[in-house]
Image (cartoon, grey):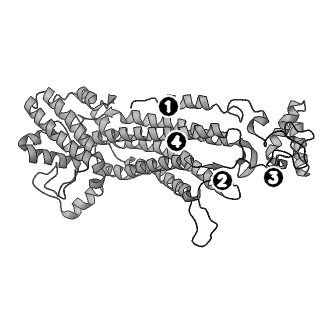
Amino acid sequence: MGSNTLWSKGTAATDPVEEFTVGNDRVLDLRLARYDVLGSKAHIRMLESIGLLTADELSVLTAGLDEILAEIDKGAFVLEEDVEDIHSQVELLLTRRLGDVGKKIHSGRSRNDQVLVDVKLFLKDETLRIRDEVLSLFDRLQALSEKYKEVLLPGYTHGQIAMPSSFGMWFGAYAEALADDMYMLRGAYCVTDQNPLGSAAGYGSSFPLDREMTTRLLGFGSLDYNSVAAQLSRGRTERAVASAAGAIALTLNRFASDCCMYMCPNYGFIRFPDALTTGSSIMPHKKNPDVWEIMRGDCNRIMSAENQISLLCGNLPHGYHRDLQLLKDILFPALELLHSCLKMADYMLEHIIVNENILQGNSIYDYLFTVEEVNRRTLAGMPFRDAYKSVGIEVNEGRFVFNVPGVAGGKSAAGLSEAGTLKDGIPDGKAGLSASDLGHTHIGSLGNLCNDRIKVKMESASDWKS
């Protein structure tokens, strides 16, 4: 392999050294192939503009690179067995097909800034893909929030029944969490959207390189101006993207955990078609939440990427070190997992089935409304602390009853039948208790979810270059 490397000077490393240092790079590099060609096309246009290539040489090299790009897009591009990496392969093909002119494309450039350009262009596209997938899931959650905004859902704290929530609030909460995650993704994009080309090995070049020209040609928003800073961005860029990916993964992780819990028959809040669950080899009744469990585990793996990158880079002095090659092994698989999880979450939610009668006939939720009753008594003139104490005494003595709005004498929410009446025949006039019956009006409460404002927040967070 050693003879076909950009750094070869006539000697080759032994096979064990080659295998150990190259590692998984050859496989991961294929994801960077088209970006390497795009970077080279911009570089040679700049070289021609400063007189290091003739117009004819530029034309020939551009045609050669376009031919390779077409092979990449068709899936016909491969790394040959004795070629170390994507950069070597592209230059080898050009030299083989075009002769000595192919050797000129590396003037004023190091493999170090080549890798930086390739990775940054790749990560820009990755963040844009993630943005689109997050937006799709956000829209799904917002639609579900609106559809089920009146359906009450028991809220829990410390794993104990706490206060009334709603499916609209639950779905909407995760939608807004994704909007916050989008701000982090936008920040990662801004860190990535800086051109390192021309920094060479980290100390610039004696050639009069036009770095602003390559910045425009490659569509970067700005430059890594200082050549040393450009090399320092290796690891920092990957960590920024990993951090944003981890934020999204944390949101998905917690939602997946909710779904695993809510699918349990002890809760029975949601379910999915049998085809989206799995069974047991011994228990015929089982409908397991395997999709959500795998998603929860994968999201933990995604969240670990930022820490792995920090540990890899944390003790390195400035400049290039071969350790940095391992960044791709950490980040690239994590991004693939994130794409998969985002798409699967959207797919599963397309088929979610909500239990719209959770409270009816279930006495375990009798104390779900203790705060509602405290507030009702406070609004009627009783001091809050006295109201709190009186309700607490009633709970302890087993005689607490929540005064369902519109029902004289007061009955528990569990007393509602599926027909929307109370068990003793007192009509309620509603098909069960709904979120709006509780009279919550403040911003972010059951009766005022502010989904329209959350949508504006997401539009602001996702409004960056495409």
Q: Nearer the viewer, mark 3 or mark 2?
A: 3
Q: Where residue 17 appears, x then y in whole percent? A: 23, 61
- Amino acid type, residue under disc 1 in the picture: Ala
Element under disc 1 = helix
- Separation of disc 1 and disc 4 at Cα? 15 Å
The answer to whether the residue labelled 3 contacts the one labelled 2, judged by CB atoms less than 8 Å apart, is no
**Residue 269 versus residue 182 in the image, above or below:** below
Residue 361 is labelled as: 3
**Is residue 265 visible from the viewing direction of this image?**
yes
Q: Is residue 181 left or right of residue 96?
A: right
Q: Which residue is mark 4?
A: 137
Q: Where residue 91 appears, x then y in whole percent? A: 15, 45
Q: Which residue is mark 1?
A: 461
Whichever of labels 4 and 3 marks the residue nearer the N terminus, that label is 4
**Between 423 and 444, which is closer to the camera in this rendering?**
423
- Separation of disc 4 and disc 3 at Cα? 34 Å
Q: Quadrant of the N terminus?
A: bottom left
